[in-house]
């Protein structure tokens, strides 16, 4: 055990001293702070979208549209002029109301992406105007006619309440994928580098090969957990600085709801990151031990990279179809278990018995795969070993 701790401590120190690790931590902190700050400032200084309303008056528009958009009203306007102004970005949206024989129509002009909320709200206003004209023309009772506009009430009776926001799962899955694949690849690179430089041959006489295997995995896991801590710490700093909007922190195209960022969700993330990394790190380390040169490593890692990408994709798919038979089957496949099971737990779409069964299957599969990975690793790193030296000297030679 003392030998293992010596190797583990050495690799942890080496990994934490690497410029890449320090730079990545610094970039992560700066990115989170800068993205949160600029998004927060943009939300304070951003102008309301500019909307031209052609064919209706201000009194015919509801208060919600007036508060949300910068409205300008016109009696008439040619279509060519509208297209020109929208194309030159002088206006964001144009709503042209036309009427023929008492029937209204809306021509909606926009530059890139339509605004469904704007159109739906404006359509209700136009419908109100149309009903009012119908009442005046046919002398229909006003209250009776207006009651036809009232929406049919819908009473919601959720059988199973979903506590977790689905949007919270996306950043969690992305971070899990990045950390697992990134640090697992660093394990493979470290093994391949030591083998190609003959350092492993110098160290093996004083320690078992498995000590090096699990020490590398444990040290990479430690570095990964430190970066996760840096990430969580950066989010807490953002919260303390007040760079949040109505309980939500925005990072360019991704948002995190602080109300959903409960301790239980974070603990589940850490748990599945640990077991997922341990599983993939075994595979990556084994592949690294089978090559003679670092140049030969990348082609062998490509299948594992694609496997990780598929696992990430299946985890995303589980947010939409958590009860699909293929998603349920993927819960019991060790390559997909960490991300798929994590997603289904946060969605509260899985029974406790199924969680236990999935973890038992994952543990058994990991034990079987680790047995063969250990054999392949020992065979890979012990081929061609030469002279014996003291471990202390070997560790110094690695520097």
Image (cartoon, rainbow, N blue to C red):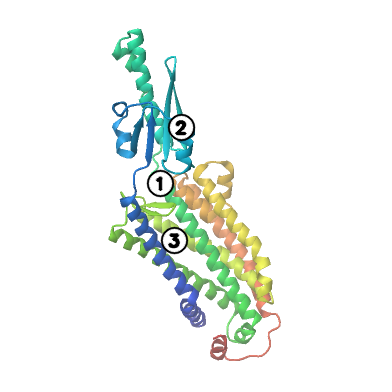
Name the secondary structure under disc 3: helix
Picture quadrant where residue 91 is located: top left
Query: Where is mark 1, residue-wise?
Result: 165
Point out the tag, 1 or 3, that comes first from the N-terminus: 1
Point out the tag, 2 or 1, that comes first from the N-terminus: 2
- Residue at 46% x, 76% y is 16
* Above or below 135: residue 69: below
Q: Position of residue 20 (x, y in %)?
A: 50, 74
* Above or below 300: residue 54: above
Q: Nearer the viewer, residue 251 or 110?
A: 110
The alpha-carbon separation of the residues under discs 2 and 3 comes to 48 Å
Label 2, residues with CA under 10 Å away: few <14, some 14-19, many ≥20: some
The mark lying in front, picked from 2 and 3, is: 2
Query: Where is mark 3, residue-wise?
Result: 270
Picture quadrant where residue 145 is located: top left
Residue 132 makes an appearance in the image = yes
Query: Where is mark 2, residue-wise?
Result: 108
* Above or below 316: residue 291: below
């Amino acid at each position: 055990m003392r030998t293992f701790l010596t190797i583990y401590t050495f690799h942890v120190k080496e990994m934490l001293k690497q410029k890449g690790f320090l730079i990545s931590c610094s970039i992560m902190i700066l990115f989170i702070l800068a993205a949160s700050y600029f998004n927060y400032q943009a939300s304070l200084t951003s102008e309301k979208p500019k909307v031209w309303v052609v064919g209706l008056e201000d009194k015919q528009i509801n208060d919600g549209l007036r508060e949300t958009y910068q409205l300008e009203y016109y009696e008439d306007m040619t279509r060519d002029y509208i297209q020109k102004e929208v194309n030159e970005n002088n206006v964001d949206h144009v709503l042209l109301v036309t009427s023929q024989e008492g029937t209204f129509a809306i021509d909606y002009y926009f530059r890139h992406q339509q605004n469904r909320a704007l159109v739906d709200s404006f359509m209700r206003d136009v419908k109100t105007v149309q009903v009012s004209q119908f009442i005046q023309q046919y002398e229909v009772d006003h209250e009776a006619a207006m009651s036809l506009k009232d929406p049919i009430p819908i009473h919601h009776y959720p059988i199973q309440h979903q506590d977790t926001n689905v949007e919270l799962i996306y950043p969690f899955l992305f971070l899990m994928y990045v950390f697992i694949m990134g640090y697992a690849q660093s394990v493979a690179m470290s093994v391949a580098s030591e083998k190609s430089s003959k350092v492993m041959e110098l160290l093996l006489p004083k320690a078992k090969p498995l000590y090096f295997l699990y020490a590398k995995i444990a040290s990479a896991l430690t570095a990964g957990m430190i970066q996760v801590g840096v990430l969580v710490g950066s989010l807490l700093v953002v919260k303390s600085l007040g760079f949040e909007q109505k309980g939500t922190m925005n990072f360019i195209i991704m948002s995190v709801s602080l109300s959903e960022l409960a301790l239980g969700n974070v603990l589940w993330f850490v748990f599945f990151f640990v077991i997922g990394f341990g599983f993939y790190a075994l595979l990556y380390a084994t592949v690294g031990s089978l090559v003679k040169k670092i140049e030969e490593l990348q082609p062998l890692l490509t299948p594992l990279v694609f496997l990780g990408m598929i696992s990430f994709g299946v985890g995303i798919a589980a947010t939409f179809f958590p009860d699909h038979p293929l998603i349920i089957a993927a819960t019991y496949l060790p390559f997909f278990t960490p991300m798929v099971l994590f997603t289904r737990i946060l969605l509260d779409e899985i029974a406790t018995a199924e969680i236990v069964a999935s973890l038992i299957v994952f543990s058994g599969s990991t034990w079987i795969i680790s047995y063969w990975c250990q054999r392949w690793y020992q065979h890979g790193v012990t081929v061609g070993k030469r002279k014996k030296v003291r471990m202390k000297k070997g560790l110094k030679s690695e520097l």
